[in-house]
Image (cartoon, rainbow, N blue to C red):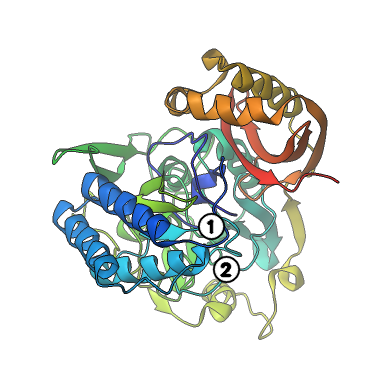
Amino acid sequence: MKHARPILCPVALTFAGLFHAGVSFAQGVPPAPPVLDEAARRSVVESAAKMLRERYVFPDVGDRAAHAIVAALSAGDYAAVDQPTVFAERLTKDLQGVAKDKHLRVSAPAAGPPVGPDGRPMPPPPRADGGVTRADMLARNVGYIEVAGFPPSVVSKDAVDRALSALKDARALIIDIRRNGGGAPDSVTHLVSYFVKGNAPVHVNTFINRQPGTQTFGSQEFWTETVPFSFAGKPVYVLTSAFTFSGGEEFAYDMQVLRLAEIVGATTGGGANPGGMVPLASGLAMFVPGGRAENPITKTNWEGVGVKPDVSVPSDDALRVALERLGVSSPAGADIDALSVSRLFTPRTTAQPGTEAAVRRMSDENARGEPNYDLLVPQLADATRNQVPRLKELFSSLGAIQSVKFVEVGPAGGDVYEVQYANGALRWMIALTADGKTAMVGVQPLPARP
């Protein structure tokens, strides 16, 4: 997914990763120039330095990182870099060299596949419904669920509940987060809630968040909630890999610290500082970590070190080893398709009722500069209020809708549409709550039809 100028962002506190908390970002107008001149590079560096000084969770580190790229610019270190993608990669390397923060990243539009925490291009995300790719019953009544991401709970909760309900009679559960690149902490907490004992809320995690432009901090606590049933007391195994990152790591860390599961696999990526995308100059953007996790038990987190498994094995062997610990033998190299006795949950493939109508309505409202805030969840409404002028500029320039085509259910659980306007085209991603309010939305430009 390409990221640049944020347009509609439904969550204030997010982890970066595979889904960037299920939030997509519009690139807006104007697009990035094909090459960057000296003035453009200076504007990018100055805007990045400003955001770091105002928003980075550790003010002294943010200031040092800002100073480093400003000094590099002044020294001419970037003079030969004129490609936006290459410049974004160079800035990311320089910033991470100071901050040692894998969430801190500069991106450019049309930059190709997202880069994972190991610096390599990430594979295409698996098809999922609210982050859940599948739920299966394996031999000897062992349940299996893969959670490949944590979209905001208003989007993911129904899918998670349905998938786990199909597995509630399993004698043990394996939760596969080896392909989980991150997401929203409220969704992490919802899943953890299925494994705690008793009805009393349990404090799962706290995030310490910097107030932008200040040296003051607030906090946000996450507690377990009531769920339809519980797996408490049953053996639970969580499978991890080096790709497991951010919100995926939080789930593994929470389950390990609360002694709710055994972690099997490889040490995770090591990113515990949530934040959000901010626009820079010339169409580039930067994910700025503005918070840090603080576990109520350990008083620390997994930043820089990852979550170390209880049973350390190559990630490709994690499922086999977890099954062996449950007394189930499996052939070496057997994948979940070969091991599944019955598949109990698959992601939906049809559009959520009401999403096409919402796309049409919001296009018209944004073109007029008059969003209907009553039809947006509160956080999305707040984000929209701050972007009305940009939304009006974008949608009024596009003109009237010519066609709306449903493409797929995206990996975050939102419906993906290709929308042709009189003067351009957008790829929409949208999801609604049960009562019809828009919970998650984002747009990207598409090449116009000839």
* Frontmost residue, 118 versus 322: 118
Residue 252 in view:
no
Quarter holding residue 65: bottom left
User: Measured from the top left, where is residue 231 in percent x and y?
Assistant: 50, 49
Task: Indicate which disc residue 18 carries.
Answer: 1
Residue at 52% x, 60% y is 180
User: Measured from the top left, where is residue 338 in percent x and y?
Assistant: 76, 73
Q: Quadrant of the N terminus?
A: bottom right
Asked if residue 387 is positioned above or below residue 172 in the image, the reply reads above
Label 2 packing within 10 angstroms: few (<14), some (14-19), many (20+): some
Horizontally, residue 209 falls left or right of residue 350, namely left
Quarter holding residue 197: top left
Q: Residue furthest right?
A: 450
| Residue type of the residue flagged with mark 1 | Leu
Asked if residue 372 is positioned above or below residue 203 in the image, the reply reads above
Task: Indicate which disc residue 112 carries.
Answer: none
Label 1 packing within 10 angstroms: few (<14), some (14-19), many (20+): many
Horizontally, residue 81 falls left or right of residue 26, namely left
Q: Secondary structure at mark 2?
A: loop
- Find out whether the residues at labels 2 and 1 contact each other: C-beta distance under 8 Å: yes
Residue 287 in view:
yes
Residue at 36% x, 71% y is 78
Q: Secondary structure at mark 1?
A: loop
- Mark 2 = which residue? 122
**2 or 1: tag closer to the N-terminus:** 1
Residue at 76% x, 64% y is 341
